[in-house]
Image: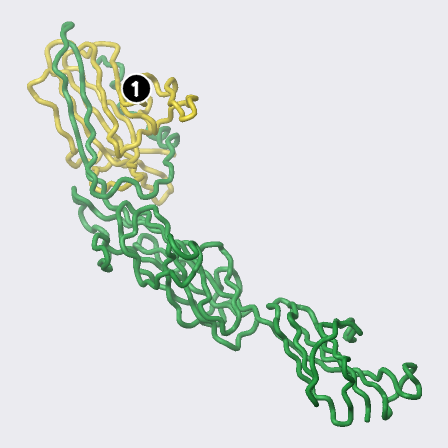
Chain colours: A green, B yellow
Amino acid sequence: MTSKLTYMGTLGLAALWGAASIPAMAAGTTAGTSVTNTATVDYQVGGVAQGQQSASNSFVVDRKINLLVEEVADATTFVVPGETSAVTTFQLTNSSNEILDFLLTASQIVGGTATHGGTDTFNVTNVRVYRDNGTTGTVGSYDPGDALVTYIDELAPDTPIRLFVVADIPTGLATGAIAGVQLRATALEGGGGGTQGAAVSQTSGANTAGKDTVFADGIGVNDGNRDASHSDADDYTVRTATLTVTKSSRVVSDPFNGTSNPKMIPGATVEYCIAVANAGGGADASSVTINDSVPGQLSFVAGTIRLNGTVTGGTCNADGVAGGSYAAPIVSGTIASVAAGATRTLIFQATVN
Amino acid sequence: MRNALLFLSATLVSVPALAANQVALENSVFVERVQTDANGRQRVLLEEPKVVVPGDRLVFVLNYRNAGAQAADKFVITNPMPSAVRFTDAGDSQPLVSVDGGRQWGPLPELTIAMADGSRRAAQPADVTHVRWAFQKPIPAGGTGKLLFRGVVK
């Protein structure tokens, strides 16, 4: 043993282990691939080259089942009561080293904390899963060209696909109501295009020299570690308009005092104000239509309707723009939009009979 | 971190060279796994390559022996990297490596890789295509030794 290299048998593993880094591997070498390593020796004896020697070993790369379900955009989906086909977006990646099918399961949480905060308070209806059409339509967003799916057929490794959990929102919900949804994908055997594969099972018991199956997936929101499944969560948050209507009136003038301390006597002019307040934190209200009947003891003054006025300190301002209509005895007007947290008015005048 | 190196007693996947030759070479591969015991101490286990998945660390072990009656000179062991394995290190055995399919050889820090724009960057372990040990001294009759290098399953 004179070779200066013979001490190699006791390499310091601790140092080596610490120094070497393993880059994150995704799918990697296809399962079932046989890897053969061959070393050769060239040498001379007595100055004469001898025949080359070689030695080989081989092993089979096993199947590593790994997948990732991720919510896309990491933000809640704002919805209004009664909305249909409200969309939450997920991404599925096959990180295994083989083409596989994936069973998709969309579910809802009942109570508890939703993934973007807040407590789950309602359930959506008609929950279904669509796969994004990556070539036509709006790629990356839900559109009618996307396919309704229950499983993903023959998904190649390392090719993320986008999935949409689509649901309908019940009516009668208040701003801030939250519904949590979850999407779980479970690996299934691939290889049969067009048909849903059987469940994959991990090779148990003794290892075999052939292609074994190892589950390498992590924990999701509703699946365990190394169970061939992965899952993530998203949620819907209701944002609606909550309108409050108040009506006020003031005497503008009377035939004797004019506008100075007018009194409510026959012939006096009265200004009515209908104020529509939209609660803060919700959605803007659009096309807000106001109808008000003029009392029988009063006569509507033509051309006095003003829309989209403001309120200061609970008192209607004498602003807004002319508009609306009068069809005895009803005054009508439509305000295009009342923003969340804002108040807009309809004002008209009438005289006391 | 304290490590213990355990060679499992199971049969190695190896093919000995022809017995008729003067030099015998044996080539084995192990999967390197780290086990953490209840005390948090880590142990490195070398296992048979039965369950091997992408990302696993492999240790290739080459045992050589001069079975002849005379010293073997100009003793060179060459190991091309399997295409599905990425070289990581060869411990402190300081082999010559090639990053161009065996045309040029040298210590890894001295090798460079041509970039698309004509410049050259330093070669990385992942660039290694061949590993070679060229012994400076003859291997005496009966002399044995062991070499090893590591890789990761792509």
Residue at 49% x, 65% y is A236
The quadrant of the image that shows the C terminus of chain B is top left
Q: Is residue A197 above or below residue B76?
A: below
Residue B84 in view here:
yes
Q: Is residue A238 above or below residue A258?
A: above
Residue A59, quarter of picture: top left
The quadrant of the image that shows the N terminus of chain B is top left
- Residue B125 x, y percent position in the rendering: 35, 27
Q: Write down the residue under mark 1.
A: B95
- Residue B16 x, y percent position in the rendering: 12, 26
Residue at 23% x, 48% y is A213
Q: Is residue A219 above or below residue B6?
A: below
Residue A336, quarter of picture: bottom right
Residue at 46% x, 66% y is A86
Residue sitting nearer the eye, A277 or A24: A277
Residue sitting nearer the eye, A128 or A22: A128
Label 1 chain ID: B
Residue A147 shown left or right of residue A4 in the figure: right
Q: Is residue A288 above or below residue A221?
A: below
- Residue B148 x, y percent position in the rendering: 26, 25
Which kind of residue does numbered mark 1 sit on?
Answer: Pro
Tell me the crowding category of disc 1: few under 14, some 14 to 19, or many 20 or more residues within 10 angstroms, Cα based: many
